[in-house]
């Protein structure tokens, strides 16, 4: 394609939402089109994720990316110059080949992620398309239902909550913009409730923009969400449902083979009964990573027991990798998967993962990372792949609102846009 050849690939330092360095890649074509990509970073990382390459040493507290930038300049860029920017799968295959490891550990998943996204953006610019149109086709019109983490726990906060994320899900909205209005109202109501009950220190926010009040028990957090939903004038379940990301690997002890939650040590069967009780008591429609990432049998059991009522989501279980997804499919381990580009390292592998999940009847949820950037690419990706769900934090902090603002913008671009609402969930949320 005339002018589509890559002219340059440049990398530079950038900062993520934790103030840690990350890599930004800018790709330019001979036609003058440009695209950029930034690599996010997670706090609770699965052991099967693509490796994030860092410098070590004293500079940047060991988190520098100078080595990654050198690899980009000396090894990767020379191989990409001259390649047609619209050949995404070829480019991603080239990155995988240059790395030569199963987990991107030689050149870094942060390098491959930022480069892959930059190439996709440059290609869409060259063709005069929006990224969601380029990746998914110009007929895409489904806006995702957002899952907003508005109470933080686990490794995302400094409180005693074992559960990492407590989410509101505006299933009763009429549009994406309406979903954000409802969410902002609930978020603001929760802020006032926390301030009144616990003082101003309770409205400090965690990594993903959610509040980090001095709580210890899961039910206390869920009760607060229900109170905020009601206080904002909405019906729990019908208008706004609830979800949790347990991130159970973070509170699992391999020596005792038990889970530390709510001041108790629970076995896997006991934890399953605990989740079942929560689903009976609250309008829960979503549970992510309910068990340790290697406990496939417990995932299968909770999906068998609760999967007809709510989404049982694998994140650390799969790490956006088709190889592990196929194991989960054989075991019927979950009925939904989380999707994070930097877990696997390229856009093509991410798309393959989503397609494999959807072809086998699993729901896919495009997700941010806790150490994210202002890059809104996943907003486009969620629309492009028609996932119907996106998870990208509270309606606060610029790296989170960038994704929401992009989705509002996309909704305004589409003729007759549709909002997913409650449709992605197995059953009507409990009222």
Image (spheres, grey):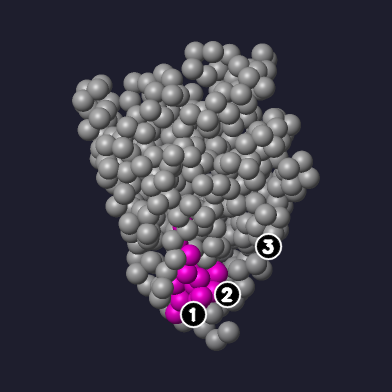
Instruction: Measure how far apart labels 3 and 1 are at the Cα level.
Output: 22 Å
* Disc 2/disc 3 C-alpha distance (Å): 13 Å
Residue located beneath label 2 in the image = 86
Stretch of the chain drawn in magenta: 122-144
Horizontal and vertical percent for residue 413? 37, 72
Residue at the outermost front position: 431
Residue 218 % position (x, y):
45, 24
Q: Is residue 338 left or right of residue 207?
A: right
**CB contact under 8 Å: marks 3 and 1:** no
Assign a secondary structure to mark 1. helix
Which residue position holds label 1?
Answer: 127
Q: Quarter holding the N terminus?
A: bottom right
Above or below for 58 versus 130: above
- Neighbours of disc 1 within 10 Å: few (<14), some (14-19), many (20+): some
* Numbered label tally: 3
Residue 207 makes an appearance in the image: yes
- The answer to whether residue 106 is above or below residue 98 is above
Decide if residue 284 is on the left or right side of residue 347.
left
* For residue 51, above or below residue 199: below
CB-based contact (under 8 Å), mark 1 and mark 2: yes
Label 3 sits on residue: 93
């Amino acid at each position: 394609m005339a002018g589509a050849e890559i002219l340059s690939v440049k990398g530079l330092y950038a900062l993520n939402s934790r103030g840690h360095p990350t890599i930004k890649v800018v790709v330019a074509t001979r036609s003058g089109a440009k695209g950029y990509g930034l690599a996010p970073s997670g706090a609770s990382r699965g052991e099967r994720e693509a490796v994030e390459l860092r410098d070590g040493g004293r500079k940047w507290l060991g988190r520098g990316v100078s080595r990654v930038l050198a690899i980009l300049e000396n090894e990767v860029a020379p191989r990409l110059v001259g390649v047609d920017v619209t050949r995404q799968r070829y480019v991603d295959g080239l990155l995988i080949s240059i790395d030569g490891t199963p987990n991107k550990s030689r050149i870094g998943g942060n390098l491959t992620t930022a480069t892959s996204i930059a190439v996709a953006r440059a290609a869409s610019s060259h063709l005069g398309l929006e990224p969601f149109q380029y990746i998914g086709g110009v007929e895409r019109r489904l806006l995702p239902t957002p899952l907003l983490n508005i109470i933080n726990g686990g490794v995302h906060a400094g409180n005693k909550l074992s559960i990492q994320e407590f989410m509101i899900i505006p299933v009763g909205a009429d549009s994406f913009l309406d979903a954000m209005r409802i969410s902002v109202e609930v978020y603001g109501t929760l802020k006032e409730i926390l301030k009144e009950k616990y003082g101003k220190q309770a409205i400090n926010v965690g990594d993903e923009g959610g509040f980090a009040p001095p709580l210890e028990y899961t039910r206390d957090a869920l009760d607060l969400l229900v109170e905020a939903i009601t206080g904002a004038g909405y019906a729990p379940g019908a208008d706004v449902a609830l979800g949790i990301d347990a991130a159970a690997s973070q509170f699992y002890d391999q020596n005792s083979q038990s889970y530390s939650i709510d001041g108790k040590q629970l076995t896997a069967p006991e934890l399953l009964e605990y989740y079942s009780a929560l689903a009976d008591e609250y309008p829960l429609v979503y549970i992510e990573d309910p068990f340790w990432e290697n406990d496939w049998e417990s995932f299968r059991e909770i999906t068998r027991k609760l999967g007809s009522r709510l989404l049982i989501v694998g994140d650390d279980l799969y790490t956006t990798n088709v190889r592990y997804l196929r194991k989960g499919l054989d075991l019927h381990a979950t009925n939904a998967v989380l999707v994070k580009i930097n877990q696997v390292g390229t856009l093509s592998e991410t798309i393959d993962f989503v397609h494999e999940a959807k072809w086998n009847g699993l729901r896919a949820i495009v997700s941010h990372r806790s150490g994210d950037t202002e890059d809104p690419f996943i907003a486009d990706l969620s629309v492009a792949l028609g996932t119907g769900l996106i998870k990208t934090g509270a309606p606060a902090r610029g790296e989170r609102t960038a994704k929401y603002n992009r989705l509002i913008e996309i909704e305004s671009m589409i003729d007759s846009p549709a909002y997913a609402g409650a449709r992605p969930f197995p059953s009507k949320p409990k009222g």
